[in-house]
Image (cartoon, rainbow, N blue to C red):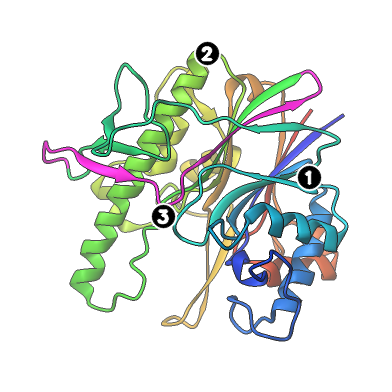
Amino acid sequence: MTLRLATYNVEWMNALFDDKGQPVATAELSARYNITKADQLAALGIVFTALNADGIMIIEAPDQSRKRSTTAALEAFARMCGLRTRKAIIGFASDTEQEIAFLYDPDVIRVGHDPQGTPAPAKGAPLGPGGAPRFDTGLRHDINADGVDELVVFSKPPLELSVTAGARNLHLIGVHAKSKIPHGVTNKDDFRRISIENRRKQLAECHWLRARAEEHLTRHDSLIVLGDFNDGPGLDRYQRLFGQSGVEVMLGLGLPRPNRLYDPHAFLALNQRAGLRPTSARFWLAPQNCYFEALLDYIMVSADLFAEGPAWRIWHPFNDPRIAAVPELQAAILTGSDHFPVTIDLP
């Protein structure tokens, strides 16, 4: 038996559902450029079916709020598409209409929300001997390296899950880290200032996540951290100001092997600063009038899981020949989102 887990950032999935959580398969344009809601939903149905995963960490899942339910929307989507991953779970809701949720097959795995850490007071709590504060509260962290701690709050609190598959017990952390792109900024000085501020916030989030990972590794938990880090080795010029990317922080590079996390795509990117590099997302750059690709989506595992020899796969519509050979699936991946799914098969 193989356990397949996936992470998939579905661009503005919330726009595909009404307030009752029902899919809106109409000719109205979705939040994806020049793509209708009906076409995006149909494409996502093809992609989710092809993934055939036992559990999928969905980034940018539908909104959870007083009027809307993430789980109702995802379970309605699963019914519409006839997916075996028909049960959904979320953790702490965000204020952004983009949630982190997990869609899974209840016949294969058992899943529970498993938040770790102690809730911090309103002013936040530092990383320390007591561990990292709970992800829906605040962290005190020196973002600007000026000796003054500032309050860091996740806009999208990571989703912590306990997962049981047969005799296997796993701990999953779903991540949607801070975007570094200063959206809507045209002034060059403001662009630089906000880019640096956003990178500092993204790094602080990754230090917080790394502290939680170390708690699990100290207990010898089987840990998987998966999602969209909005970052990667050498991804932008501002990274040189801080010495390393948030992904490198999360991996624990330089630590003893049992304390590291492992992702072969991240390691390849680290060792291939020029030349061949894996990518998991594709964006249109209007000034250059072309597409730009980046590695943003990761599945990092603890050393015990890495030793089992799992298989990672980026479902890239052009670089994966198994997908390129199926035009319907290739088109669906390009229509469904600006990110590509990433899977891991655990033997």
Residue denoted by label 1: 53
Q: CA distance from mark 3 to mark 1?
A: 29 Å
Q: Does the magenta portion include 235?
A: no
Q: CA distance from mark 2 to mark 3?
A: 33 Å
Give the left or right position of residue 79, taking residue 174 as reference: right
Badge number at residue 219: 2
Residue denoted by label 3: 235
Label 3 residue SS: loop
Give the left or right position of residue 188, taking residue 234 as reference: left
Crowd rating for badge 1 (residues with CA inside 10 Å; few <14, some 14–19, many 20+): many
Label 2 residue SS: loop
The magenta span reads: 145-167
Crowd rating for badge 2 (residues with CA inside 10 Å; few <14, some 14–19, many 20+): few
The part of the image, by quadrant, that contains residue 304 is top right
Q: Amino acid at mark 2?
A: Arg
Q: Earlier in the sequence, mark 2 or mark 3?
A: 2
Q: Earlier in the sequence, mark 3 or mark 1?
A: 1
Is residue 3 at all visible to an observer of this figure? Answer: yes
Image quadrant containing the C terminus: top right
